[in-house]
Image (cartoon, rainbow, N blue to C red):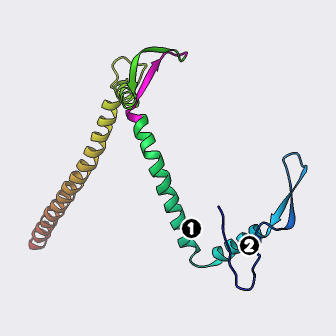
Amino acid sequence: MEINVNVEGVEALDLTTVIAERVRYDEDGEPETTDVTLGERVAALIAAKLTKEEEWGGLRKRYLDIRTEVIREQVTPIVAEAISGPIQKTNIYGEPTSGTTTLRELIMSEVSTVINQKADRHRSDSQTLLQRNISQAVKTILEKELSEVFAAEKAKVIAAVRAQAADLIASAVKQGIGR
């Protein structure tokens, strides 16, 4: 990328001018010297200024959103092709076998295998994984619903017993006082 900087009064500004050397050490501890150009230093100062601004968070978010969208645009057709495109079936050694399939068919086959396998492989009478999960979900829902119904009915019974007990106590007190 070529960037041209025009500053009035400065006619021949060469951003490739070396202004310093940078020393870094590699993984073996050996020094590596690289040149620092005027352009690199200017870019570092501009970046430092921009990142100190309050708007930096917005700029960063906008950049990340654009980057994500560009990546998504590039990857989406590749994934769609991989899912719907043909795949050569192979044996465990990677040698081609009969016919082709698609990733979608492989995924559906694997899902079918998983949901239809026995939840407990050591028992012959066990449910499939799908059956067990559905049973657990129904049990959880029923327990919640029934506990709410039982709590409401229990409250009604307690209220009725209290009312009846109050009447019995009042009646007993009247009989006791009336004697």
Please, what is the three-letter code of the amino acid marked with disc 2? Val
**Residue 14 shown left or right of residue 163 in the figure:** right
Please, what is the three-letter code of the amino acid marked with disc 1? Arg
> What are the residue bounds of the magenta stretch?
83-93
> Marks 1/2: CA distance?
20 Å
Per the image, label 2 sits on a secondary structure element best described as helix
The spot of residue 73 in percent (x, y) is 45, 51
Identify which residue, 27 or 36, lies in the foreground: 36
**Residue 99 shown left or right of residue 67 in the figure:** left
Question: Looking at this rendering, what residue extends furthest in the right direction?
Answer: 30
- Residue at horizontal 72%, vertical 74%? 45
Asked if labels 2 and 1 touch by Cβ distance under 8 angstroms, the answer is: no
The spot of residue 169 in percent (x, y) is 16, 66
Q: Which residue, given by chain and number where applicable, does mark 1 sit on?
A: 60
- Residue at horizontal 47%, vertical 48%? 74
Quadrant location of the C terminus in the rendered image: bottom left
Per the image, label 1 sits on a secondary structure element best described as helix
